[in-house]
Image (spheres, grey):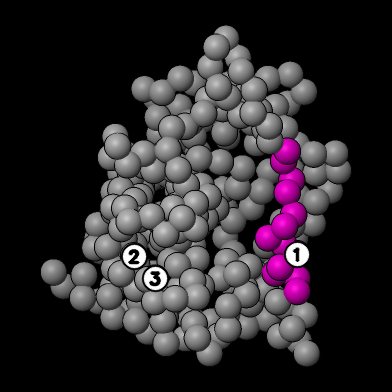
Amino acid sequence: MIDLVQRVIAWLMNRVRVNQVHQSMRDGVAVFVKRRRAGGQIVVWLANRFLALTDSGVCMFVHADEWTDWEVHCAQLLYPERQGVTVGSGQAVIVPEVRGISLRELLRRDDTDVNKAFVLAARELRRVHQIHCSYYKAAWSHGDLHLDNIICDLNAERAVLIDFDTRHEFHVSQTQRHSDDLKMVLLELIGLSDDKWKQLATVFIEEYREGSALGELSRRLFVPRGFARVLWYARTHCSSIRRIEPRLQNLREIINRVKVL
């Protein structure tokens, strides 16, 4: 019964949207306008209480101005060559459209280039994990790196990270933050209903290949208890633990093999 309740809560969590997003045109440029929903501050406050109970090491921004500042900071830090993200009226963030397709959409389409997309994603994640962030006084991290937040332009052979409305807590170490970014991508993969996950996880880990983050990740690959299991279900799309545990062992084996290469 407890397990069922945890799954239901996780299912609901995946459907809560704090920000509303719509497409628009600004000066002839396609943009996305993100704005905090009515009542969003209360939802974020409650979400942060839950995230603290799970010892997740991540948090959302209670105050919209802190969120908009972080969005602009991350976009400028990671992609200074791109047209800038700006703050609009009503505490909105205006984000120029990024060319490409999300990893989740590529998986839905069963695209033949999905392996290449995961290589590009790992390459980009390794790059941004080397960028110094003044907020952390250490290397940057994302904090909510699900498959919708990685956009791949297969023709340009480039991946871009988007949506910076969640961050890691500042007290969490750089290695832990990087391993958490990796873990979120991989937990979504092992939640897939078929066996394509293993090939995708392998190319992703092989391309990322940063030893300290992978070592920390290997130590964190276990099914948690208590409140943390709700977050686990949310990240694995409520997949059966019986199916997940052998896949976690497979992941540890892949990581250990890559670390000795």
Dot placed on the residue nearer the N-terminal end, 3 or 1: 1
Report the mark closest to the observer, 1 or 2. Answer: 2
Instruction: Residue 67 in the image: state x and y as whole percent.
Output: 65, 36
Report the mark closest to the observer, 3 or 1. Answer: 3
Whole-Å distance between the Cαs marked 2 and 3? 5 Å
Side of 219 relative to 170 (left or right): left
Label 1 residue SS: helix
Chain part drawn in magenta: 8-20
Residue drawn at (64%, 23%) of the image: 24
Q: Residue furthest left?
A: 261
Label annotation for residue 3: none
Residue drawn at (79%, 57%) of the image: 46
Disc 3 target residue: 197
Instruction: Residue 26 in the image: state x and y as whole percent.
Output: 60, 14
Residue drawn at (53%, 17%) of the image: 29
Label annotation for residue 200: 2
**Which amino acid, mark 2?**
Leu
